[in-house]
Image: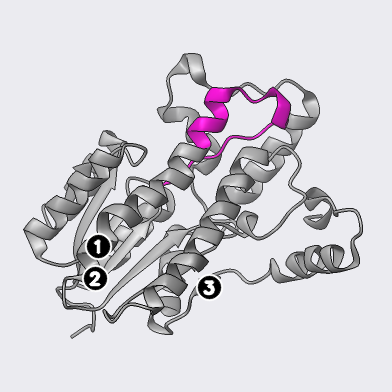
Amino acid sequence: MSQWENQVCVVTGAASGIGAGLVRHAASLGMRVVAADIDAGGLDVLKREFEGAIEVVGTDVTIGSAVDSLAEYSFQAHGQVNLLFNNAGVLVDGKSWERTEQDWRWNLDVNVMGVVNGIRSFVPRMLGQGAPGRIINTSSIGGLLGGGQFMGPYQASKHAVSAISETLFQELSLEPAPVTASCLCPGEVDTQIWESDRLRDPAKKNQLASEAEQKFHDHVAGMVAEGLPAAEFAEKVWQGIEADSFWIFPQKEFKTMFQVRADSIMKETQPAALADLMQ
């Protein structure tokens, strides 16, 4: 029997991409899974796929009361949460000064406040559940690297998630309860992250104003489409969890780029362009 049998897993941003991969893997291990997302259609697909073996809860992670309701439901239904994946995320790209206030707020509200709301709603309950728990916040290699031209809103949000996760780990280490945290930093995974606007009001969709921005968008979106399949990625995530890792790097190739950034900071040189490093 799997060590995860009958343990409880909650995943936000569960309807597609990395989130759906995490849901499927958790279910394959015999976990009781609560899948949350704003994408009702994607949740319906998961629900039909698992024929009631998982539970789906429509949740807008940008609304604190909605995440409170998700936590209340999860604990009423199962009494504990052993793995919480604060995974919901979106991406806005383009020149920083041309992104609208709505663009910036949407990216920060989902990627940062979604994590914050998950922490606020679940951690107090997890500390009192009398069972082991782990909060896994999805950052990105973009939350460790710099120089991402046209990536200001996204990288700003993911750097925040990395820092929040480090702080959360330290704070939880001071508590007597067996609850800890991890920071998950995906590289290129075959997801719809570069099509985040699909669930947005058409009037609010991001517009790229130059050929250079569109070329960059198409290039990186193409690389992502050829990235690690979500199912394989999820297996690597669980390997990191089972190793009790704080930093979970399913793809480690980024470390050379990170070293270039660290060296630039230490030597106080101009930042290298991420696009150049990805050649």
Mark nearer the viewer, 1 or 3: 1
Q: Position of residue 198 (x, y in %)?
A: 45, 29
Mark nearer the viewer, 2 or 3: 2
Give the magenta-colored segment's residue range: 88-107
Q: Earlier in the sequence, mark 2 or mark 3?
A: 2
Q: Residues within 10 Å of mark 3 (few under 14, many from 20)?
A: some
The amino acid type of the residue labelled 1 equals Pro
Q: Earlier in the sequence, mark 1 or mark 3?
A: 1
**Disc assigned to residue 127:** 2
- At horizontal 56% and vertical 52% (from top left) the residue drawn is 160
Pointer 1 with pointer 2, Cβ within 8 A: yes
**Disc assigned to residue 143:** none
Which quarter of the rendered picture does the C terminus lie within?
Answer: bottom right
The amino acid type of the residue labelled 3 equals Trp
Helix or strand or loop: what does disc 2 sit on?
Answer: helix
Pointer 1 with pointer 3, Cβ within 8 A: no
Q: Residues within 10 Å of mark 1 (few under 14, many from 20)?
A: few
Label 1 vs label 3: CA separation?
23 Å
Q: In the rendered view, would you say 3 is above or below 116?
A: below
**Residue at the spot of label 3:** 247
The amino acid type of the residue labelled 2 equals Leu
Q: Position of residue 69 (x, y in %)?
A: 18, 45
Give residue 95's quadrant in the image.
top right
**Residue at the spot of label 1:** 124
Q: Residues within 10 Å of mark 2 (few under 14, many from 20)?
A: some
Label 1 vs label 2: CA separation?
5 Å
